[in-house]
């Protein structure tokens, strides 16, 4: 190839081929979903992936609700402990006050 075309043109051919491939990533980014949906196997894979995501999302919501319930219980327990401590402190102060009188 270098003998027939010369150094400059022979080196330019791969460069021109590479330059022609530049738009492909952008085209795939823009039209990739439509292209994949036209393929039978890709459409099945997309449907399966959507089912998995739906199940995972539902599981995450259930786990999130459980975590919230647990946090609410912990907060209620802490509040109850604080109330109990305040009640004991008040009883102690009342008993000390009645002893002084």
Image: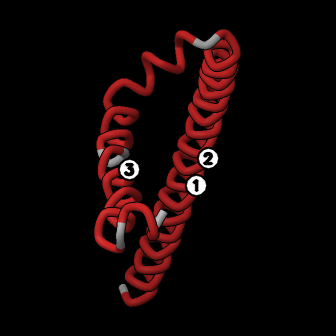
Q: Secondary structure at mark 3?
A: helix
Q: In which quarter of the view is residue 11 placed? A: bottom left
Residue in front for this viewpoint, 69 or 59? 59
Q: Residue shown at 36%/24% (left/top)?
A: 31
Task: Between label 3 and label 1, give the one nearer the viewer.
Answer: 3
Residue 63, above or below 51: below
**Which secondary structure lies at badge 2?**
helix
The reply to whether discs 2 and 1 touch (Cβ–Cβ < 8 Å) is: yes
Residue mark closest to the camera, 2 vs 1:
2
Is 78 placed left or right of 22 in the picture? right
Instruction: Report which residue position mark 3 lands on.
Output: 17
Q: Would you call the spot at circle 3 few (<14 residues within 10 Å), some (14-19), or many (20 or more)? A: few
Image location of residue 10, percent across then percent down: 38, 64
Viewer-closest of 25 and 91: 25
Q: Position of residue 93 (x, y in %)?
A: 41, 80
Q: CA distance from mark 3 to mark 1?
A: 66 Å
Residue marked by disc 2? 70
Total marks shown come to: 3
Residue at 44% of width from left, 22% of height from top?
Answer: 33
Residue positioned 53% across, 61% down in the render? 78
* Vertical order, 89 against 24 (above or below): below
**Distance between the alpha carbons at the discs numbered 2 and 1:** 6 Å
| CA neighbours of label 2 inside 10 A, class few (<14), some (14 to 19), many (20+) | few
**Frontmost residue, 62 versus 38:** 38
Residue under label 1, please give it: 74
Identified at 61% across, 28% down, the residue is 53
Q: Are marks 3 and 1 in contact (CB under 8 Å)?
A: no
Is 71 placed left or right of 29 in the picture? right
């Amino acid at each position: 190839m270098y003998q027939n075309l010369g150094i400059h043109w022979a080196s330019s051919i791969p460069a021109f081929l590479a330059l022609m491939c530049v738009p492909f990533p952008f085209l795939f980014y823009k039209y990739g979903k439509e292209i994949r949906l036209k393929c039978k196997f890709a459409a099945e894979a997309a449907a399966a992936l959507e089912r998995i995501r739906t199940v995972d999302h539902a599981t995450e919501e259930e786990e999130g609700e459980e975590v919230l319930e647990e946090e609410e219980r912990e907060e209620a327990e802490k509040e109850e402990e604080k109330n109990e401590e305040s009640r004991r402190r008040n009883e102690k102060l009342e008993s000390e006050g009645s002893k002084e009188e």
